[in-house]
Amino acid sequence: MTFIKTIYTFLITLLIVTTTFGQQAKHKTKILLLGTIHFETPHLDEFELKTDDFLAPKRQQELEELTEVLKRTNADKVMIEKPLNQQRKIDSLYNAYLQNSYKLTVSEREQIGFRLAKKLNLKHINCIDVFYGMKHDSLVAVTAKDKNQLYLLKELGTNANNLLHEIDSVVKGNSITEVIKYINRDELLQRNLSLYLKYLAKVGAGENYIGAESVSDWYLRNIAIYANIMNQISPNDKYVILIFGQGHIPILKHLIENNDDFELVEVNSVLK
């Protein structure tokens, strides 16, 4: 009995040690989701800010300061909101920028993405966007009118514009770093996502579900982006920075938080 008890104790101890070691050894890639406003207008978004001049000396200095802070992460990859099928074009532009033969456009993809990747001495910048059109949008207004639900679209528009006005006032009175910190707060992320979930999804519910299908178009695009993120992260990557429009961040955040290969990094823990 003593021998059996000793063997039993040894096996239990081995199991605990093995389990503990396995937990400690599991590598997780840290991902910083940097939600931004779009620096250039007009853009493709229905509701968008009329931004100021991000090529002005003051804003350029702020971009230098922002990317200097982000550089401290020693990120292995920088991912931007450019379609995957434009990777060759972006590679060409970025290589020209590395050789000081390309002037950055006003786009945040270049002003933040290219600038940061160069500071990190990266040879490549990752395109991960996929464009799925909002195929059901044209039917939403028709359905809303037919089902006496136009009030939903009116409330959506009112709340979207209120959110834009709030962000616009923050942009006008603060540095780019402070703007990014503000728009990445949980409250702002939730308010953006609620425009889809609280108002749009309800249109046609119980009959044709056009609103829900329209929301599914938005989710599909973000899930496809997430698939590209997973596909472009290698096992050796310790830290990845993703620069995307703020509206994408709530869904991407949810997806990344529920993948145990990744560790989500909060913006305000980096931009202190």
Image (spheres, helix red, strand yellow):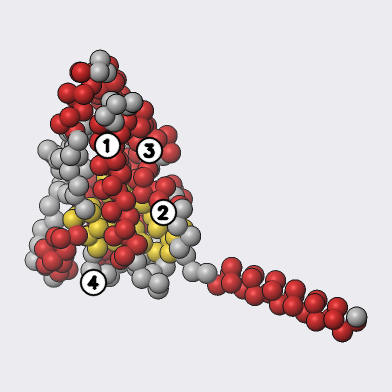
Mark 4 in CB contact with mark 1 (< 8 angstroms) = no
Q: Which residue is pictured at 27% across the width and 69% down the height?
A: 122
Residue identifier under label 2: 256
The disc, 1 or 3, on the residue closer to the chain's N-terminal end is 3
The disc, 1 or 2, on the residue closer to the chain's N-terminal end is 1
Q: Which residue is pictured at 21% across the width and 28% down the height?
A: 140
Q: Which mark is residue 213?
A: 1
Residue identifier under label 4: 123
Residue identifier under label 3: 189
The amino acid pointed to by label 2 is Ile
CA distance separating discs 1 and 3: 21 Å
Mark 1 in CB contact with mark 3 (< 8 angstroms) = no
The quarter in which the N terminus is drawn is: bottom right
The disc, 3 or 4, on the residue closer to the chain's N-terminal end is 4
The residue lying furthest to the right in this view is 1
Characterize the local packing of mark 2: few (<14), some (14-19) or many (20 or more) Cα atoms within 10 angstroms: some
Disc nearest the viewer among 4 and 2: 2
Q: Is residue 71 visible?
A: no
Horizontally, residue 154 falls left or right of residue 254, namely left
Characterize the local packing of mark 1: few (<14), some (14-19) or many (20 or more) Cα atoms within 10 angstroms: many
Q: Which residue is pictured at 35% across the width and 36% down the height?
A: 193
Q: Is residue 268 visible?
A: yes
Residue 166 coordinates in the image, percent (x, y): 31, 28
The disc, 2 or 3, on the residue closer to the chain's N-terminal end is 3
Disc nearest the viewer among 2 and 3: 2
